[in-house]
Image: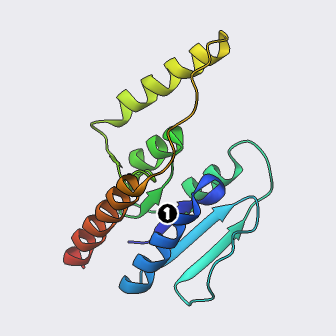
Amino acid sequence: MNIWVDADACPKAIRDIIVRAATRTGRSTTFVANHVIPLPKLPHLAFIQVSTGFDVADNEIVRRAQPGDLVITQDIPLAAEVIEKGCLAMNPRGEQLTRQNIGARLNIRDFMDTMRASGVQTGGPSALGSREKMAFANTLDRLLAKAGKRR
């Protein structure tokens, strides 16, 4: 299992958790973004900088991710695409996205887009707190441990 990170909007605290988990497990981890992401120089970490543009980083992840890989993203359409490809997906709040729940997440996302387009102020997600960071770390550890057993 390789780890792919949609790094354009990945919070630094989550990036740090990912780096520590990748270091501990030796998993190949690639951050993809359209701007430079500072990362430690470690053999299992990689960074791919893509050009700016709509979904350029997402498309690069979809192109490179293989079945069984883990994709970390808060982008629901990207998660849906990689799940369809046979990848695992989770968001920075620690929620694993699956074939069973991704349809509902897409519907909510589309509904919220419609609300915003009609002028309703929906606000953004709440700030990332210690509970969300802990949930992320726990879900990541669980997925990596499960993948380690399948080796």
- Quadrant assignment for the N terminus: bottom left
Of all residues, the one furthest to the right in this rendering is 52
- To which residue does mark 1 refer? 14
What is the number of callouts on the image? 1
Name the image quarter holding residue 43: bottom right
Q: Is residue 79 left or right of residue 55?
A: left
Examine the rendered structure and indicate whether residue 39 appears above or below residue 8: below
Residue 57 versus residue 113: which sits nearer the camera? 113
Residue at position x 19%, y 76% in the image: 149
Give the secondary structure at mark 1.
Answer: helix
| Front-most of residues 128 and 1 | 128
**137 vs 42: above or below:** above
Q: Quick one: quadrant of the C terminus?
A: bottom left
When the figure is inspected, residue 53 is found, relative to residue 40, above or below; the finding is above
Point out the residue furthest to the top here.
118
What colouring style does the render use? rainbow
Residue 31 x, y percent position in the rendering: 60, 67
Residue 46 in the image: x percent, y percent? 61, 78
* Residue 7 as seen in the image, left or right of residue 13: right
Q: What amino acid type is highlighted by mark number 1?
A: Ile
Q: At which x and y percent is residue 27?
A: 42, 80
Q: Residues within 10 Å of mark 1 (few under 14, many from 20)?
A: many
In percent of the image, x 47 and y 57: which residue is there? 72
- What residue appears at the point 35 percent right and 54 percent down from the top-left corner? 131
Residue 124 x %, y %: 57, 33
Residue 54 as seen in the image, left or right of residue 18: right
Where residue 84 sits, quadrant-wise, is top left
Extreme residue toward the left, this view? 149
